[in-house]
Amino acid sequence: SDDGAIDDAKEKKASRDGPPPNEPDRFDDNGTLSEAERSQILQAQKQHIRTELDAAHRIAEDPPSFIPPSLPFSSMAVPETIVSTLPNGIRVASQETYGQVCTVGVLSNCGSRHETSQNVGVNHLLELLAFQSTENRDAQDISALMDEIGGATFASGSREQMMYCVDVLRPNVEVAMEVMADTILRPRIEEADVEGMKRVIEFQHLDMLPEVKLGEGLQVAGYGPIDGEIQQLGRPHFCPLEALPALNTEVVHNFRKDHLLLPHEMVIAGAGIGHDELLKLAERFFSDIPVENLNQAPSGHRTIDSKYTGGGFQLQTETVDGFTRVALAFEVGGWHSDDLVPTCVLQTLLGGGNSFSAGGPGKGMYSRLYREVLNRYHWAESAEAFTSFHAESGLIGISGSSAPLKSLDVTRVLAEHFGKLATQPVTDEELDRARNMLKCNVLTQLESRLVLFEDIGRQILTYGKREDSHTMSEKIDSVTKEDIMVIARKAISSPPTLATVGDDISKVPPYEQVAAAFQR
């Protein structure tokens, strides 16, 4: 009844306003206790509730001696990237951040592009084997040691480079470097370890996102075989399941020796550490890599330029959401191209994302693909620009997704936007926004110590030097509307690459039809 509901509401309100009936008002919810009564209750609580930490966990008034003192601003030099070279050819690069945590690591020009038909997938396997057992420590010991010293390990492989790093409290960097040297130079890789990581690869394939499969398809199609020979950039990055039986410890060790442990192709990088300290640690732990490796596999023989071919890729596979994903891409210049920065501005200008977004500053809600695709077509689930750069070539493209019945419309819209870029100049407002947003993204990300470490290592490995933020910002500001149009026209003059992944891909137009549309 209504009366019963009112009584229940009153009872609940009373329980919120004060203690239950026949219970003492310990927290003085009703404000009836005197100061003496409050003091008496507090003293009684202290007898049973411990409020002070023991000596081992108590916060001391003075910082521990092993924590470096905070420096006054007047004694801090403006951080800059410093580069040195060890006698065996390894380059050492670092930049100070004046923090209490540092990131150190090793990068090597070793990637899945260096695989052959006999060891496909070994680079993927090598990444998973990082920071496992070594000649000096078991994997469990390494994990426990990282917990003890406040460290976290990371390993990441790409088509062109392999990266190992440790993020650690600054006083413990020496121990971290020792562990990292062990995992790179003295790993204990046994058949049981290899078989265990092969099972991990199988699980990864079960959980692989459709977007990842789409990206793999773009590479395989964009750099297709020439005269029956698979090109380096057209090799799969993730180990195919059919390649697993051929992988064993001997294959892993041979790949490491031929491609990973070449001093002239390695960089030891650090962010948040003094250069002299990093140089001493590098000499101590990595100077024993023999210089003779310089003559084992010259970079020119290991890395063979791939030629862009364009092409189509289709994969009909079950997805969680049932959407069909389409990506259309064209060739642009690689890491060493003058078009690199304008291409990045173009990608930012196009922007995009998913149809659902929380919005907010910096989310790209005013980018072209949001305004002219996601906000215009109700059936567009996503539309986003992307780039993929390599030493000799690169891709710029747009990916989109929708219900299968709208796949033709998605492909049409993607093609129309490339055509628009080549025939109509972008507006001043769009260009200004894209340039500012790209600078904001770059500078904001470099505030992260891990990103700074990776940027130092990859730039030194790719260019032999590192550009500072001021130089990069100037390059971004110098991009013009004419530059954007030139890149778009140059891109669509090459054959397109069309990749499709989804449960139902029957409505996606054939590759030949899309290619013909750009030849008119």
Image: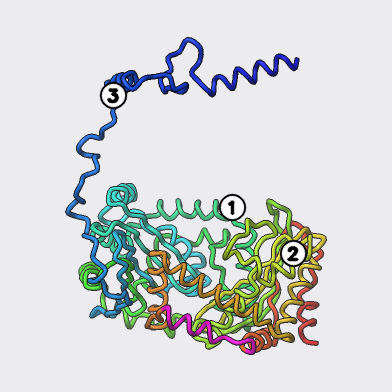
Against 162, residue 17 (above or below) is above
Calculate the distance from the C-alpha at mark 2 to the C-alpha at mark 1.
31 Å
Kindly identify which residue carries mark 3: 46
At label 3, which amino acid type do we have? Lys
Please, what is the dominant secondary structure of the magenta stretch? helix
At label 2, which amino acid type do we have? Asn
Circle nearer the viewer, 3 or 2: 3
| 377 with respect to 383 (left or right) | right
Against 35, residue 164 (above or below) is below
- SS at badge 1: helix
Circle nearer the viewer, 3 or 1: 3
At 32% from the left and 81% from the top, the residue drawn is: 294
Q: Looking at the rendered structure, which numbered label has been put on residue 207? A: 1
Please state the extent of the stretch shown in magenta in the rendering. Answer: 469-482
Question: Which one is in front, 378 or 185?
Answer: 378
Task: Check residue 337 for magenta coloring.
Answer: no
Q: Is residue 121 visible?
A: yes
Q: Write down the quadrant of residue 77 in the picture.
A: bottom left
Question: Which one is in front, 512 or 240?
Answer: 512
